Amino acid sequence: MARQTRKEVRDSLLEAMKMKGMESPYFLDLLEDYMDLWDMKRILRIDIKKRGPIIEWQNGANQKGLRKNDSVVEYPKISKRMTDILRQLGIDSPVISKTPYEKGDDDDASGEEDIGL
């Protein structure tokens, strides 16, 4: 299935909330929390694609090894919180946009995007 852009996801969730009459500041704040988590999840996904699940570390000239990528640990936590917010909003499935995903618009790990890690 094609990935949606941030705007498409937000608009879809907002439309679903409007259909349910959930337009109070509290619910809109929950939507913004969801979108913040969506951004974080995207960054984690890019990091996992770019660096892999196991990364090399080095503390000094003689101290180095392999460890798990922290993004792998955080990814399911973020996903669970996103699901919790959708449940809190009473949204089982958002209104799906029919705009196709265009390659290069989302999380191409080979791109030059700085993900801050």
Image (cartoon, rainbow, N blue to C red):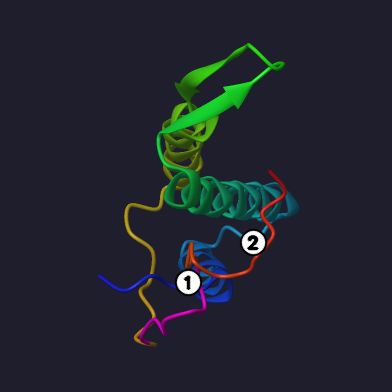
The kind of residue tagged 2 is Glu
Q: Nearer the viewer, residue 65 or 41?
A: 65
Q: Secondary structure at mark 2?
A: loop
The residue wearing badge 2 is 23
Magenta-drawn segment: 100-106
Q: Which mark is residue 44?
A: none
Q: Position of residue 17 (x, y in %)?
A: 52, 62
The kind of residue tagged 1 is Ser
The residue wearing badge 1 is 12
Q: Say whether marks 2 and 1 touch (CB < 8 Å).
A: no
Whether residue 73 is situated above or below residue 9 in the rendered picture = above
Q: Nearer the viewer, mark 2 or mark 1?
A: 1
Q: Which residue is at 38% across, 71% downward?
A: 95
Q: Residue 101 magenta-drawn?
A: yes
Considering every residue shown, the one lying at the far top of the view is 63
Whether residue 117 is situated above or below residue 105 in the rendered picture = above
Per the model, the C-alpha gap separating discs 2 and 1 is 14 Å
Q: Which residue is at 49% across, 44% downward?
A: 51
Q: Nearer the viewer, residue 2 or 103?
A: 103
